[in-house]
Image (cartoon, helix red, strand yellow):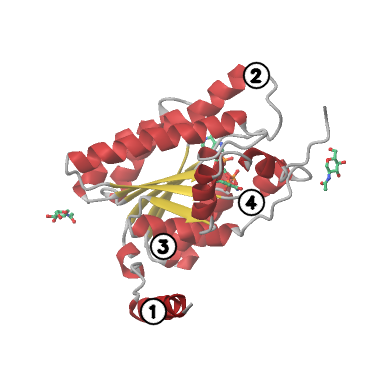
Amino acid sequence: MKAIGTALCAAGIVAALLAFFWKDPFDPERLSGARVLLTGASAGIGEQMAYHYSRFGAEIVLTARREAVLQKVAKKCQTLGAKKIFYIPADMSSPSEPERVVRFAVQNLGGLDYLVLNHIGGTRFQMWDGDVEYTRRLMQVNFFSYVALATAALHTLEKSNGSLVVVSSLTGRIPTPFTTSYSATKFALDGFFGSLRHELTMQKRKVSVTLCILGLIDTDTALENTRGKVYLTASPAPEAALAIVRGGAVRVQELFYPWWLQHVCRLWVLFPSNRDQVLQSYYNYSGP
Ligand SMILES: NC(=O)c1ccc[n+]([C@@H]2O[C@H](COP(=O)([O-])OP(=O)(O)OC[C@H]3O[C@@H](n4cnc5c(N)ncnc54)[C@H](OP(=O)(O)O)[C@@H]3O)[C@@H](O)[C@H]2O)c1
Ligand SMILES: *[C@@H]1O[C@H](CO)[C@@H](O)[C@H](O)[C@H]1NC(C)=O
Ligand SMILES: *[C@@H]1O[C@H](CO)[C@@H](O)[C@H](O)[C@H]1NC(C)=O
């Protein structure tokens, strides 16, 4: 008993010292004047990221499909403090768009420090219905366009020791119901960008790769998709966006938001026997 008490006491002292000396590695100054290309910037988490980068004084190129909405977001970015703001409407289901968008960003910003890949195509939250064509389309928007954007920007990012930030999901680590195709696109991101990170390190190329693993976030599309189908509470999009912006800036390999998702992923690996039953209990399904 005495030994346990001593150990607990020592752990407490160490924790207190760590808390006292721990410095936030995030330096907002580093984002002032940073050149950012941000996709899926017209709504949801992407829109919120645009506002955060603006408050930090970044130079930003926004992209998504809807020009009128991009224009509105850009205007707000300006009032929030963006040093430069441009937007380019583009549909990432078209294979030629990624290169055009990167070219536009590099031309207007004179280089790139951050490529933030965040857009997704329209997602169905339902049982697999056999529509292979839908899966193919979603792969194009959620995965192939990410590969093409990163490829087009890599050389430019290398010149500035820049960062690739890839927005994924818990569903890209742990398969969940109602997300067959979406889950597949996110798992693909983990594979591709995880492997690319190895290669960049092995080649001593100074481009960081941050994979962001998000839980349910309260964006309009996510709430609409999951209404009545899950027993989960959504976290706020502005907070998720800030976590991603900070994670990219401090060059972490993996960013979890909410933070405790990293423990969910660990427990998932540790307890394979009854994990599926627990997970399924969060989903509302009363069919056969
Ligand atoms: N919300 C969540 O619960 C949640 C959870 C885990 C992970 N995430 C991830 O977080 C990221 C953002 O999600 P969100 O909820 O903020 O999404 P969202 O609100 O639906 O926004 C999606 C963005 O992508 C754009 N977009 C859609 N189709 C496109 C296309 N074909 N080409 C180019 N742009 C397109 C949309 O703008 P336009 O319509 O103007 O093109 C919009 O700006 C995604 O990577 C998502 O997987 C979200
Ligand atoms: C990138 O990093 C290398 C090595 O750390 C350094 O020599 C170089 O000056 C950096 N370049 C920029 C643009 O920061
Ligand atoms: C669960 O789904 C059923 C049928 O789709 C629906 O009627 C019910 O309201 C849902 N329950 C909750 C708590 O959302």
Quickly name the residue at label 2. 131
Residue 257 place in picture, x, y as percent = 52, 56
Q: Nearer the viewer, residue 210 or 219?
A: 210
Q: Is residue 44 visible?
A: yes
Left or right relative to 204: residue 280: right
Mark before the other along the chain sequence, 4 or 1: 1
> Does the residue at mark 2 contact the one at mark 4 (Cβ under 8 Å)?
no
Residue 245 place in picture, x, y as percent = 43, 58
Q: What residue is at 40 percent from the left and 57 percent from the top?
A: 247
Q: Nearer the viewer, residue 269 or 24?
A: 269
Foreground tag (4 vs 1): 1
Residue ranking furthest to the front: 1
Cα separation between marks 4 and 1: 44 Å
Q: Is residue 50 visible?
A: no
Left or right relative to 143: residue 203: left
Mark before the other along the chain sequence, 2 or 4: 2
Quickly name the residue at label 1. 10
Mark 4: few, some, or many residues within 10 Å (few <14, many ≥20)? some
> Ligand 2 appears in which quadrant?
bottom left
